[in-house]
Amino acid sequence: MAKKLTLSVIEKENKKFLEKQRIEFDNGEYYLMLDKHFSPKKITSLLREFNEKILYIREKGIDPSDFDHVSYFWFLTIKYFTDLGETITDELEQQLFIMDQLLDSNYFSQIIGTFNDEQINTLSDYLSRYVTNMNALLNTIAPESVAG
């Protein structure tokens, strides 16, 4: 027999989003805490920031081909799902500087490689739905400019 869904059940299930995992680098000299589970709320915040920064780039007249979208998306993943994000500003220019520092070190790929595959798949699913919804919205607003 099914049980009644209550706020306390939801709250209990959501506690998993508070769980952290410690990862170590350089034979234990450094460590970083990362989220074991990616919360939908943080994923939505990541996607919102990604979109805002893409719009900012367009407003500033920066050629989108000069912007490394993939690395920036992974950078935001680090920002939102590790404790390193607590020190990362929202200012794009500063973020790009930090991202370049991470990319030039071995830490960027090491951090990305420690995320759980299931969580990366969840993030990928959200991203896929986001892109689909944005394309549908753009087609609704200006179908001729999207098609051509």
Image (cartoon, rainbow, N blue to C red):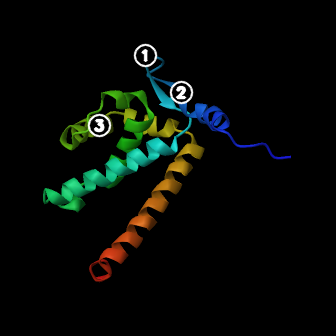
Q: Nearer the viewer, mark 2 or mark 1?
A: 2
Position in image of residue 27 (x %, y %)? 48, 19
Q: Nearer the viewer, mark 3 or mark 2?
A: 2
Mark 2 = which residue? Answer: 20
Taking the view exactly as shown, the residue that stands out farthest to the right is: 1
Tell me: residue 109, above or below residue 49.
above
Amino acid identity at mark 1: Glu
Q: CA distance from mark 2 to mark 1?
A: 19 Å
Q: Front-most of 115 and 43?
A: 43
Helix or strand or loop: what does disc 1 sit on?
A: loop
Q: Earlier in the sequence, mark 2 or mark 1?
A: 2
Tell me: residue 89, above or below residue 142.
above
- Would you identify the image quadrant in which residue 4 lies? top right
Amino acid identity at mark 3: Asp
Mark 3 = which residue? Answer: 104
Mark 1 crowd level (few <14, some 14–19, many ≥20, 10 Å Cα): few
Residue at 32% x, 54% y is: 51
The numbered mark at residue 29 is 1
Helix or strand or loop: what does disc 3 sit on?
A: helix
Position in image of residue 113 (x %, y %)? 49, 39
Q: CA distance from mark 3 to mark 1?
A: 19 Å
Tell me: residue 124, above or below residue 145.
above
Position in image of residue 48 (x %, y %)? 36, 50
Q: Earlier in the sequence, mark 3 or mark 2?
A: 2
The numbered mark at residue 73 is none
Residue at 29% x, 78% y is: 142
